[in-house]
Image (cartoon, helix red, strand yellow):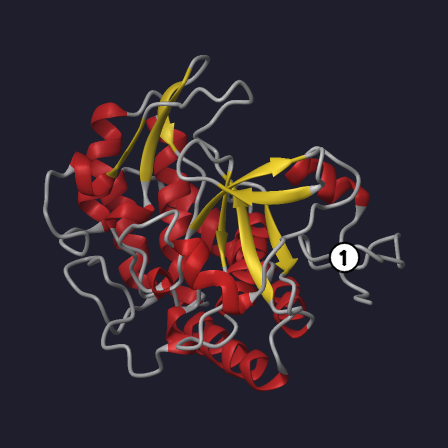
Amino acid sequence: MNDKCLSCQTAGADLKLPDGYHPRCSRKLFGTTLPPKVPFGTPDIAGEAQKMVGRMSISGVQPKLSMTHDRRKHQLTVVESGGFYILKPPTERFESLPENENLCMCIASAYGIAVPSHGLLPLLDNRLAYLVKRFDRLEDGSKLQQEDFQQLLQTNDKYDGSYERIANIIKKYSNVSGLDLVELFERALLNYVLGNGDAHLKNFSLIKEENIGYHLSPAYDIVNSRLVLPDEREEMCLSLQGKKNRFSRKDFIKLAEHFGLNKKQSANSLDRLNDIKPVFENMIEGSFLNERLREGFLDIYKKRMGRIGD
């Protein structure tokens, strides 16, 4: 029995979690007090994946299964289209990628970045898979208009871009560009300190909602790629201030200036990142990663925080 929730990764007031979830976390993700079951194990993934075929990036070595919640059977069901969830099972190539992604998403949320509801779920063989709720689908099944930045920048290469070019598109099309530019700056900071070297153009999107208009979608596909790819050539796959390695605090301050943020805004984002450092470290140490991976994650995080800290 876990003593930590498989979604928020904290014990909280509910110390007994026989189904692995705080009731409030289960309701947020599934609309039910108890989480549903996944009716297959890791050996069955290949067959299930045939129902949903697509290209994938680093996290993309995992089959991504589109799923719906069958409340009558109290289980998740694989569907070819129209799913409300995406399930990413474990992969033999990259160790503990589901645990890695759930941790990164929890950290992003703690920093104040909008993320969709997410959590870990045990498969029949008790290995954990990562599940995220689709933010582009409404309860009635209709789909919100969404375009990722590979589409918006009209490039065939999802790695052919920069944070500056993303910012220019936001300035042009977002109905809340001021808020989105601050959020983009904070995502750049977070991707760097978390070792996410695979945050490419398809991992950023504009979405249109009725009462807001176009705005930056919630963050998704955040993973510490450096942890599973220690020989990764670049610290960031999208350029920032014309480079992809050897970043300093000065680089991020200049990036904020390009975005049009004032000194108070950039200082606030950097200061909050520094102030929340003990919280992040506790989250990493208390995560579902094994001890070796926790130590590796902490090492990456501390070194990068050291480069952009005061």
Question: Can residue 222 be seen here?
Answer: no
Q: Whole-percent x and y of residue 287?
A: 65, 69
Question: Can residue 289 be seen here?
Answer: yes
Q: Nearer the viewer, residue 189 or 9?
A: 9
Q: Whole-percent x and y of residue 183?
A: 41, 41
Write the residue at 38% across / 70% down: 225
* Label 1: how many Cα within 10 Å (few below 14, some 14–19, many 20+): many
Left or right relative to 153: residue 287 = right
Q: Please, is residue 176 above or below residue 253 in the view?
A: above
**Which amino acid type corresponds to the residue marked 1 in the rendered image?**
Gly
Q: Residue furthest bottom?
A: 292
Q: Nearer the viewer, residue 218 or 282?
A: 218
Q: How many marks overall?
A: 1
Write the residue at 39% across / 77% down: 93
Q: Please, is residue 113 above or below residue 7 in the view?
A: above
Write the residue at 33% across / 20% down: 175
Label 1 residue SS: loop
Q: Whole-percent x and y of residue 245?
A: 24, 71
Q: Please give the residue where the numbered disc 1 appears in the rendered image.
A: 20
Q: Whole-percent x and y of residue 227?
A: 43, 77
Write the residue at 88% across / 53% down: 14
